[in-house]
Amino acid sequence: MGNVSDEDHSKRTIWTVADDKLLAAAYTIMSKDSVVGNAQKSESFWKRVVTYFNANRTKGAKKRTAEKAKSHWASLKKIVNRYNGIYNKWYNDQPSRWSNEDLMVRAHEEYKKRRATKKARTSESSGAHTDSSNPNTTADIDDREI
């Protein structure tokens, strides 16, 4: 059967914000590799991503498999794309006096505002209780900091 690590058979893998940032960096670096470029197959691409991720993870963080990294990126990229859309809107319409930091702060504020509005609409339509003190509430990936 071989050696199967704990993270390979766990039902749910917890990803920290630091893990998310590292995964995004690994994805970006491997996507821009001029030697391999777009000629890489999905399986080899994700093996390279997870190799980079595992080599650069914070001390004590779990190793990840290519399968788990690919799966997590599928949900994470939705958030990244949503934020990028807002950022690009502000980038194209920014006042000339804004710095890059002003631009990022404004885009992040709008992202959080849109997220809060969406959660409120969802809660109202479903009648769900959204008390953050409820210990049985699971964190939505969109609640994480960008």
Image: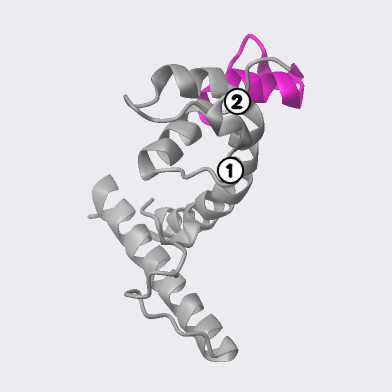
Name the quadrant containing residue 122.
bottom right
Name the quadrant containing residue 133.
bottom left
Q: Secondary structure at mark 2?
A: helix
x and y percent of residue 7 in the render?
Answer: 55, 32
Quadrant of the image for the N terminus? top right
> How many numbered discs, if any?
2
| Front residue (pair 106, 114) | 114
Residue 47 - label: none
| Front residue (pair 12, 122) | 12
Looking at the rendering, the stretch of residues picked out in magenta corresponds to 27-48
For image coordinates 37% across by 59% down, the residue present is 107
x and y percent of residue 59 in the render?
Answer: 31, 24
Q: Is residue 40 magenta?
A: yes
For image coordinates 37% across by 80% down, the residue present is 131
For image coordinates 44% across by 69% down, the residue present is 137
Q: Amino acid at mark 1?
A: His
Disc 2 or 1, which lies upstream in sequence? 2
Q: Secondary structure at mark 1?
A: helix
Crowding around mark 2 (Cα neighbors within 10 Å: few <14, some 14 to 19, many 20+) is some
Q: Is residue 123 visible?
A: yes
x and y percent of residue 118 in the render?
Answer: 50, 76
Task: Give the colour scheme of this rendering.
Answer: one colour
Q: Amino acid at mark 2?
A: Ser
Q: Is residue 72 magenta?
A: no
Residue assigned mark 2:
31
- Using the image, determine if residue 60 lies above or below residue 135: above
Residue assigned mark 1:
72
Real-space CA distance between mark 2 and mark 1, rounded to the nearest whole angstrom: 17 Å
Q: Main secondary structure of the magenta part?
A: helix
Q: Is residue 99 visible?
A: no
Q: Nearer the viewer, mark 2 or mark 1?
A: 1
